[in-house]
Amino acid sequence: MRTARRYLAREIYRSCTVVLLALLGLFTFFALIDELDALGENFTLVSLMYLQALALPTRLYDLLPIGLLIGAILALAGLAQRNELVILRVSGVSGMKLLRLLWVATLPLVAVALLLSEYVTPMAEIKSGEANLLLRGRAEGGRMASGYWFREPTADGGMRILNVKTLLSSGNVQNVTMYEFKKGQQLTTLSRAKTGTFADGKLILENVVENRIGEQALSSLADAKVPDVPMSSVHKVDRRELDTTLTPERLLARVLVPERMSMLTLLDYIDYLSANQLQADRQVVALWRKLAYPFTLLVMMTIAAPIGFMQTRRGGVGAKVFIGILLGVAFFMVNQLALNVGMLSRWPPWLTALGPNLAAVLLALGALLVMESRHSLSRLIQARWPWRKSAI
């Protein structure tokens, strides 16, 4: 059985490698064509190639499940066409036992997926964001037209809202606007700084212009009276230090798509959002999806099994691969639809992340059991009434 498992694993790895290389090449080519319009004096073809090279780990992360599905179907269909699966079945290996062999062969790929999910992809995304900032002056991700927005409490029970216009590759910031509110959400200070750096839990702002709003401003506006003193005053400060919960890592977490972060970074960012009473549902769902990602490969192998086990006379290799592509695209669409519907309907995060996987596993196992029962029933009928051709 060990020999059969190694042989199956070798065939699947070979087919998956070919499929993933083809998919990576195809998607990279399309991305290059799409970005050609952005070329200019400051953004050359070499820069574009560098950015596309940094995007390869993320692209592999996205394509690995569907590449495994197509590669496994291709390998199993080839084995069925050469009657090698028939030999395994005749030697006493049932469909479920063969599926367990396929699951064991998938475990090394699960380990690779964990490494890719937790280390390679987050590092590549950070490098890609830094390169985009350096080469194109902008970063991909959760950026609004006005920049990045953060909120955190202050020591006096008030609140501070920060708007960062530009993130630098070093983790520092430029063009910072800060709104400070005292308890009761009354605006007290509007500050603008050209640069900001993080050090030892502090945000150090340089060249700060502060617009301080007087205590009597609110009552003067409410009573529609001319105040005795100015309602606001402008002050210039060379340097100002603020105690903050923000770090360069959390700024980068704001830039990255939640599914591209590592689980440790996601947990830290969720804690930050929860501590500042900000919405963290998207990040919690992303954390569950990160946990479910390695097991998606087992789901893909489970879907590939009944398609690959089909007899060659019911469809050639091309037909099986086509069915696999359709199922992979359908699974991807259902997965994305579940994410959007789950967020809108406020489903539990585990259901939003694991629902499509569980449904796909149940359907694939059901199809495999139906195939097994049909073969068993056919053999039983032919054993009892050998002159009859089973129509099952």
Image (cartoon, rainbow, N blue to C red):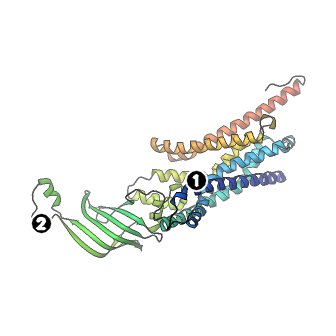
Q: Identify the element where label 2 is drawn.
A: loop
Picture disc at residue 229: 2
Q: Please state if 304 lies on the left or on the right of 218 as rendered.
A: right
Look at the image and tell me whether residue 246 can be seen: no
Look at the image and tell me whether residue 325 can be seen: yes
> Are there few (<14), some (14-19), or many (20+) residues within 10 Å of tag 1?
some
The quadrant in which the C terminus is found is top right
Q: Where is residue 383 shown, x and y percent of the image? A: 88, 28
Picture disc at residue 233: none
Q: Which residue sits at x=69%, y=50%?
A: 68
Q: Please state if 172 lies on the left or on the right of 295 as rendered.
A: left
| Camera-side residue of 86 and 97 | 86
Label whose residue precedes the other's in the sequence (1 or 2): 2
| Camera-side residue of 23 and 186 | 23
Spatial CA span between label 1 and label 2: 59 Å
> Are there few (<14), some (14-19), or many (20+) residues within 10 Å of tag 2?
few
Q: Which of the two discs, 1 and 2, sits closer to the camera?
A: 2
Q: Identify the element where label 1 is drawn.
A: helix
Q: Where is residue 194 shown, x and y percent of the image? A: 35, 71
Q: Amino acid at mark 2?
A: Val
Find disc 1 in the rendering and name its residue.
291
Q: Which residue sits at x=50%, y=56%?
A: 257
Spot the residue most to the bottom. Answer: 238
Q: Where is residue 149 shown, x and y percent of the image? A: 38, 59
Q: Amino acid at mark 1?
A: Leu
Q: Please state if 352 lies on the left or on the right of 94 as rendered.
A: left
